[in-house]
Amino acid sequence: MRVAAVDADRFLDPEHPRWPGHWATPPTQWPEERLLGQETQRVIDEAIERLPATQRAVITLRDVQGWSGEEVCNALELTETNQRVLLHRARSKVRRALEEYLSEDQ
């Protein structure tokens, strides 16, 4: 079973008269002080650890270690397109984990 990177209900209907496929509600602005906390970093680390191996490798190299897309493609023997897809999926899953954690107090 394949899970969408971002839930479809987060977007307007493709037949929407003015904004087809746009965000139904924009992503939430998170308070900076919460994002900088150690507990939030733990949530991020755990979310990354739960990712499939290739997604975990791509997000770690790109977002944690700061590698370029080209460097990641060369190291992992990925096409540029595949690297972008894996990074998008990984970031979406980490974002979902953050949204769940940060919405607990609201």
Image (cartoon, helix red, strand yellow):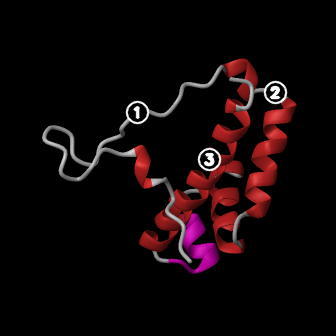
- The amino acid on which the numbered mark 2 sits, given as a three-letter code, is Gly
Q: Count neighbours of disc 2 (C-alpha within 10 A) and say few if under 14, some if 14 to 19, many if 20 or more.
A: few
**Mark 1 / mark 2, whichever is N-terminal:** 1
Residue 72, compared with residue 102, is above or below; it is: below
User: Total label count?
Assistant: 3
Question: SS class of the residue under badge 3?
Answer: helix
- The amino acid on which the numbered mark 1 sits, given as a three-letter code, is Thr
Q: Position of residue 76 (x, y in %)?
A: 63, 76
Query: Which residue is label 3 attached to?
Result: 96
Look at 67% across and 21% down and name the residue there.
32
- The amino acid on which the numbered mark 3 sits, given as a three-letter code, is Arg
Residue 86, compared with residue 97, is above or below; it is: below
Look at 69% across and 71% down and name the residue there.
52
Q: Position of residue 67 (x, y in %)?
A: 62, 56
Q: Position of residue 5 (x, y in %)?
A: 51, 59
Q: Nearer the viewer, mark 3 or mark 2?
A: 3
Question: SS class of the residue under badge 2?
Answer: loop
The answer to if 101 sits in the magenta stretch is: no
Q: Nearer the viewer, residue 68 or 50?
A: 50
Query: Which residue is label 2 attached to?
Result: 37
Q: Range of the magenta residues?
A: 71-78
Q: Position of residue 56 (x, y in %)?
A: 70, 64
Q: Nearer the viewer, mark 1 or mark 2?
A: 1
Look at 75% across and 53% down and name the residue there.
47
- Separation (CA) of disc 1 from disc 3: 15 Å
Residue 98, compared with residue 104, is above or below; it is: below
Q: Nearer the viewer, residue 64 or 20?
A: 20
* Left or right placement of residue 60 versus residue 87 in this view: right
- Separation (CA) of disc 3 from disc 2: 18 Å
Residue 16, compared with residue 85, is above or below; it is: above
